Amino acid sequence: MGSPAFNPILPGFYPDPSLCRVGGDYYLANSSFEYFPGVPIFHSRDLVNWRQIGHALTRESQLFLHQAKCSDAIGAPSLRYHQGRFYMVTFNGVTGRNFYVSTTDPAGEWSEPVALEQRGIDPSLHFDEDGRVFLTTNGTGWNPVRGLYQCEIEIETGRQLTPTRFLWPGTGGSYPEAPHLFRRGGFYYLLAAEGGTAECHMVTVARSRDPYGPFESCPGNPILSHRSLMSPIQATGHADFVEDHRGNWWAVFLGIRYASGSFHNLGRETFLAPVTWTNDGWPLVNDGQTISLELPFDELPPLHPWPSPPARDDFDAPHLGLSWVFLRNPNAGDWSLTERSGFLRLRCSPVTLNDLASPALLARRQQHFGCTAATVLEFDPVEEKEESGMCVLISNDHHCEIAVTRREGRRVVIVRRTIGDLSCEVARTPAPPGAVRLAIQADRENYHFQVLDERGQPTVLARSPVRYLSTEVAGGFTGAMFGLYATGNGTASPNTALFDWFDYVSH
């Protein structure tokens, strides 16, 4: 029995995985929706241990997110490698267009976007052995016939070379999507997701001798689904396949884990399972068995763990760490790492966490049910509208924050809960003099909002149930995020907040 591998391989809000192999190295991309920069890129040498090396979309010219709604914008990227170059193709729900970017260095800068003519979402590229490049999408939003569609493109320009043709309707499940075309032996295989992205999610496959079909449905469909199963992993679907450098096949796919009851707050996560092939050439995911959280993979490449990232960000690097993201396209004047050395400075933007704009907010994913996020804040509000602190949010209308502000002439710490169109301060206490240490501790049931003394001992001001920041309540396709923010609550203010450090510790 080999060394165990643990699912999820990417915990937290990392949905819609797509991957490719270059020799003994593996690269993976995920959806990022309304967050900037977009499409995180990961690197692995064993398919289990991953480290983030960059983002594919780092400039506003690549990533237009203005007024992006929650879970809008960048979804379902596809990552491919061909003749020394990486290609990431995706759909932007704000602009309504498919596009791709490319690079020779996935950890560096990617090209300006190349627009694609074929509509639909979940675009994927296949570089065929005969030199043709196929673009496959689903028909959502432009064709009344649900299913998967395809054309050929010129990869240098994105120009469409052939008419768009219908490929396959799926097996009858709702929302056939997430197509990936690949070749094995004498067949073209077409992966799809069906059943929606919740508990009925599933992976299906069809094959044909011709890239345009007709496609024959696998007699074992769905080849992956946890619908109706009592498993800690639910909503499994949206898979991509890769053959490793030793000839074994693997699937990455999304799934969810409930925090408590039927509520999940970490978002759709990335999981891994082995793929084998039947004698008549059909894929079997995990031999048709339920996927487990702990999987002893005898066939895995030798494990290659990366150094663990530090728990504390001291904000003393010249650039933000890769775990940090903004909501929508950030305003350059709202934040700085250089205005005061060793501190993150946030300006009190008029934009609030409720707005469909870009607040003065830096956020990172919650990746564990049990964890604590903490910071130390220097902030002296002058007006009652000025506030700064920490938040946990899943959308612009589902979030909670612990913040320093001013009430009735006094500097105070408040806790606010916003659930849909209901918003209420649930706690208030005088702020200690000087810098204030704030923390949000999470478990499977609640978020605990705390003020820490100089020894790190907490005083809990309020609790908020996890279910109010779950997908089942908030909707959408993202997950909970911890953030540092500053706002003037509708009023532009020159006041600034300084954060000395930020900790994220799992427990």
Image (cartoon, rainbow, N blue to C red):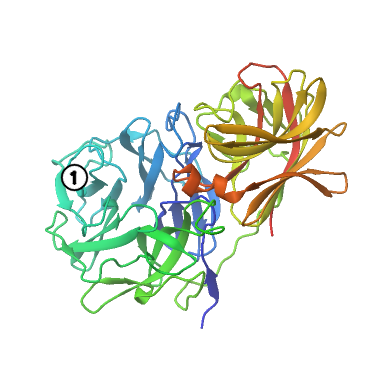
Residue 358 lies, in percent from the top left, at 54, 27
- When asked about the image quadrant of residue 184, the answer is bottom left
Q: Is residue 150 rendered to the left or right of residue 319? A: left
Could one spot residue 494 in this view of the protein? Answer: yes
Crowd class of label 1 (few under 14; some 14 to 19; many from 20; radius 10 Å): many
Q: Nearer the viewer, residue 504 or 477?
A: 477
Q: Quadrant of the C terminus?
A: bottom right
- Of all residues, the one furthest to the bottom in this rendering is 1
Q: Nearer the viewer, residue 180 or 125?
A: 180
Q: Secondary structure at mark 1?
A: strand
Residue shown at 66% from the left, 21% from the top: 488
Residue 407 lies, in percent from the top left, at 77, 23
Q: Nearer the viewer, residue 320 or 21?
A: 320
Q: Is residue 89 rendered to the left or right of residue 501? A: left
Residue shown at 58% from the left, 28% from the top: 359
Taking 297 as reference, is 155 above or below it?
above
Residue 85 lies, in percent from the top left, at 38, 48
Where does label 1 land, which residue? 151
Residue shown at 59% from the left, 26% from the top: 352
**Amino acid under disc 1:** Cys
Residue 109 lies, in percent from the top left, at 48, 39
Could one spot residue 322 in this view of the protein? Answer: no
